């Protein structure tokens, strides 16, 4: 019955919606997995933008490549995704592997040099734009605003685009007016609202519910940004393709807010504690539970606990994008989606659902 309802909803929405952004991130760490995932694996996906996560920066303001794979074949293979002129290929500046401090220092003290380094790098490797990852609270608001302004001016001269990845709950950390004016896209990473692993938390509650574990949500953070004056048509709502995992302290307490002893065990391929790719998750046997107030679902088995998007919760988030007149969605990351249809719902289901909602006519 759920599949029938989903099909009807999709038919109704795709009849009048087209042209939304679908921004797909690729983490180049995936090239080093036991079963590696390369950019060529995404040839069947239909994203409007792809962002290559794998570039850092020095405190002096120079762009630096983080892996020999990137320049030996990673960039070239990624650029081969440019199947037609409508696809835009970005590189992300400020990878998690690089940390945030060097980028913060370069923006504050080496702004002009960093601006020029980014422009040269984009032209050298033929990227269409850059995504500045500022999902931290360790930077100066004014310095970031000046950097975005200067970088926008420089990129305009070479016909390149600029996006900024932000952490929704840190609204006061950003100059919203500057971002709205100068960024082509604001990628709104509305998931994983807390870094604490002391208790189980929904990965991305759509709405705030009564419990403290659901006090921050996609809706509450977007409401704050809209009140601060952000332009709706710049916002891409980024959803997580992975599952967030916890190790429960007790098998008798398995709900949202249950006590946890830390992140869950690493996946067999990704090998990152607290995270399971979709293709790793669906091979496991869990009991499903729904948190309807927050429009989420979670799963448990013994002392293992996972929060991950279902097709139903994704549909609700994609509908939320339409209802709020946002620019589109982002998928973080496409390499953690179900590339080989392991879950039997179709390859790259998170991305494909977005495609059905926003691009199909």
Image (cartoon, grey):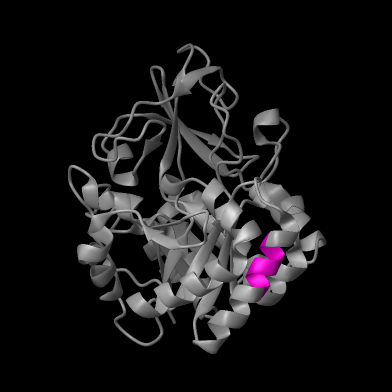
On screen, residue 296 above or below 92: above
Q: Residue at x 74, y 64 (%)?
A: 176
The secondary structure that most of the magenta stretch takes on is: helix
* Picture quadrant where residue 300 is located: top left
- The residues colored magenta run 144-149
**Residue 289 position within the rendered picture, expressed as x and y whole percent measured from the top left:** 49, 32
Question: Going by the image, does 215 lie left or right of 136?
Answer: right
Q: Is residue 224 visible?
A: yes
On screen, residue 246 above or below 151: above
Q: Residue at x 41, y 73 (%)?
A: 121
Q: Give the number of marks.
A: 0
Image quadrant containing the C terminus: bottom left
On screen, residue 61 above or below 302: below
Question: Going by the image, does 132 lie left or right of 345?
Answer: right
**Residue 238 position within the rendered picture, expressed as x and y whole percent measured from the top left:** 53, 57
**Residue 134 position within the rendered picture, expressed as x and y whole percent measured from the top left:** 59, 55
**Residue 109 position within the rendered picture, expressed as x and y whole percent measured from the top left:** 63, 58
Residue 145 magenta: yes
Foreground residue, 81 or 163? 163
Q: Is residue 189 visible?
A: no
Foreground residue, 275 or 340? 275
For this orientation, the residue located farthest to the left is: 35
Residue 250 magenta: no
Q: Residue at x 31, y 79 (%)?
A: 82
């Amino acid at each position: 019955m759920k599949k029938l309802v989903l099909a009807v909803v999709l038919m109704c929405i795709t009849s009048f919606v087209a042209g939304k952004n679908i921004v797909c991130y690729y983490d180049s760490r995936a090239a080093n997995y036991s079963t590696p995932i390369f950019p060529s694996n995404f040839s069947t996906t239909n994203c409007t933008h792809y962002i290559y996560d794998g570039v850092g920066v020095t405190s002096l303001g120079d762009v630096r490549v983080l892996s020999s794979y990137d320049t030996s074949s990673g960039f070239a293979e990624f650029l081969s995704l440019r199947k037609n002129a409508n696809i835009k290929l970005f590189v992300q500046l400020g990878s998690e592997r690089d940390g945030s401090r060097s980028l913060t220092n370069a923006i504050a003290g080496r702004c002009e040099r960093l601006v020029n380094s980014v422009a040269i790098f984009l032209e050298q490797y033929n990227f269409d734009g850059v995504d500045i990852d500022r999902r931290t609270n360790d930077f100066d608001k004014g310095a970031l605003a000046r950097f975005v302004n200067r970088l926008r001016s420089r990129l305009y001269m070479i016909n390149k685009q600029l996006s900024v990845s932000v952490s929704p709950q840190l609204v006061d950390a950003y100059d919203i007016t500057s971002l709205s004016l100068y960024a082509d896209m604001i990628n709104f990473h509305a998931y994983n609202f807390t870094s604490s692993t002391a208790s189980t938390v929904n990965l991305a509650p759509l709405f705030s519910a009564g419990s403290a574990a659901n006090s921050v949500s996609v809706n509450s953070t977007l409401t704050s940004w809209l009140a601060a004056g952000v332009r709706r048509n710049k916002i891409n709502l980024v959803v997580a393709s992975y599952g967030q995992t916890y190790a429960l302290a007790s098998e008798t307490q398995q709900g949202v807010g249950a006590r946890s002893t830390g992140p869950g065990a690493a996946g067999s391929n990704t090998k990152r504690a607290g995270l399971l790719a979709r293709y790793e998750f669906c091979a496991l046997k869990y009991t499903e539970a729904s948190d309807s107030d927050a429009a989420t679902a979670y799963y448990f088995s013994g002392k293992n606990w996972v929060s991950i998007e279902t097709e139903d919760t994704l549909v609700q988030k994609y509908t939320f994008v339409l209802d709020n007149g946002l620019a589109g969605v982002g998928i973080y990351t496409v390499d953690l989606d179900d590339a080989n249809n392991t879950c039997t719902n179709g390859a790259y289901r998170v991305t494909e659902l977005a495609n059905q909602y926003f691009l199909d006519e």
